[in-house]
Image (spheres, rainbow, N blue to C red):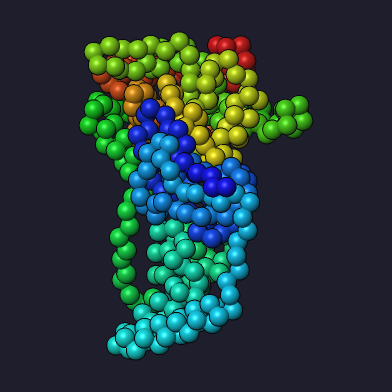
Amino acid sequence: MSTEIKVPVLPESVSDATIATWHKKVGDAVKRDENIVDLETDKVVLEVPSPVDGVIKEIKFKEGDTVTSQQLIAVVEEGAAAAAPAPEAKADKAAIDAKNVAATTAEAQPVTSKAAATEATRSAGGVDQLPPGARFTAVTQGIDPSQVEGTGRRGAVTKEDLVNYASGKTGGVSGGARPEERVPMTRIRARIAERLMQSKNSIAMLTSFNEVNLGKVMAMRKELGEQFEKANGIKLGFMSFFAKAAANALQKHPVVNASVDGNDIIYHGYADISIAVSTDKGLVTPVLRNVERMSFADIEKGIADYAKKARDGKLGLDDLQGGTFTITNGGTFGSLMSTPIVNPPQSAILGMHAIKERAIVENGQVVAAPMMYIALSYDHRIIDGKDAVLFLVDIKNQLENPHRMLLGM
């Protein structure tokens, strides 16, 4: 019996999807709930599993094609078994491959030895199976990806793996070549670019800065971190302090939590905070809902769950919908200071940065303290400079006196 595989029902905000990767080809055996294909939307990558055990009988679209909700994309023959190729077929294929190699070699004689070596590396190492960025790195660096241990999804070799592998080598197959490769943007990357331009062109954006002494937060984590982990099964990080401080501050400065809709301002009586997470495919912002009601443990668990989903490509569209305010942490990559871009229709975003020991004056004495610059980018159409500064000062006061957060002050 044949079973049809269709595009999942897409939300109203997502009109179509792109066939990103087929994990099976016609004739391959597939098990029930095994992922057959990845569909990339403007926001997430969706996995489409097989509902039955069987064999892929037909594939309707190739990678890169655009499909819509409930469109038929493949057919599985239920209960069938994959047929092994006959020896004669293998022999014929080997003869054809040998002929093709001979023809290719004859045609490629004028090519330089370095270029030939690079192409050999591409063919032998399965370079063509890599994502575009990783493929470009493998070819230009002359790396055989089969020799590189992958840290990506399902053990896939990523661009970072190849860069790290190449850092221990000298020279390279490409030598002094200046290669280029043109690849189309992924749907997610194109959507990010569109949203950034929308933010730039439609928002009167301004950024205010302050700095925070995180000495007391670090002392609290050191004193209570072990007990916290034993009690809640998760470590006490920095993000929960910032998320809770932001939620408290948003309750006291509601205009920072508002959004613009035409000529109206919508004030949100809840703090749904988007937490920026970096993935191989780009930046995503899953939403922690009602942070004003969450405990530190709930926040840490929510962030950890989203981070795992992002790494595994399991974030759903519901995880990314909504959000009234965003927090982004460039400090994880070493950023000392930046001006984050507001994510419409939100009106503000808080940027965290690297913690650095700096000399400050405290009670008339010069002391070393763990300092962080924080930035608030905001829509100046509805948020005045005074509101932005007071909001940042509120964040600073809470983090420098973390017990205030426990009292909701």
Position in image of residue 59 (x %, y %): 45, 53
Q: Give coordinates of residue 376: x percent, y percent.
A: 38, 27
- In the image, residue 43 above or below residue 118: above
* Nearer to the camera, 177 or 73: 73
Q: Position of residue 366 (x, y in %)?
A: 53, 33
Q: Tell me, yes or no, if residue 330 can be seen here.
A: no
Question: In the figure, 24 relative to 96: above or below?
Answer: above
**In the rendered view of the protein, which quadrant contains the C terminus?**
top right
- Seen at 35% across and 34% down, the residue is 15
**Residue 28's quadrant in the figure?**
bottom right
Residue appearing at x 53%, y 17% in the figure = 290
Residue 117 or residue 222, whichever sits in front: 117
118 left or right of 230?
left
Taking the image as shown, residue 18 lies to the left or right of residue 356, namely left
Query: As rendered, which of 369 and 218 lies closer to the eye?
Result: 218
User: Residue reaching furthest front?
Assistant: 1
In the foreground, 27 or 326? 27
Q: In the rendered picture of this protein, how many numbered marks are placed on residues?
A: 0
| Residue 232 on image: x %, y % | 72, 27
Q: Residue at x 45, y 40 (%)?
A: 7
Does residue 75 appear in the picture of this structure? Answer: yes
Q: Is residue 113 left or right of residue 262?
A: right
Picture residue at 59% right of the left edge, 79% below the top? 87
From the viewer's perspective, is residue 268 above or below residue 299?
above
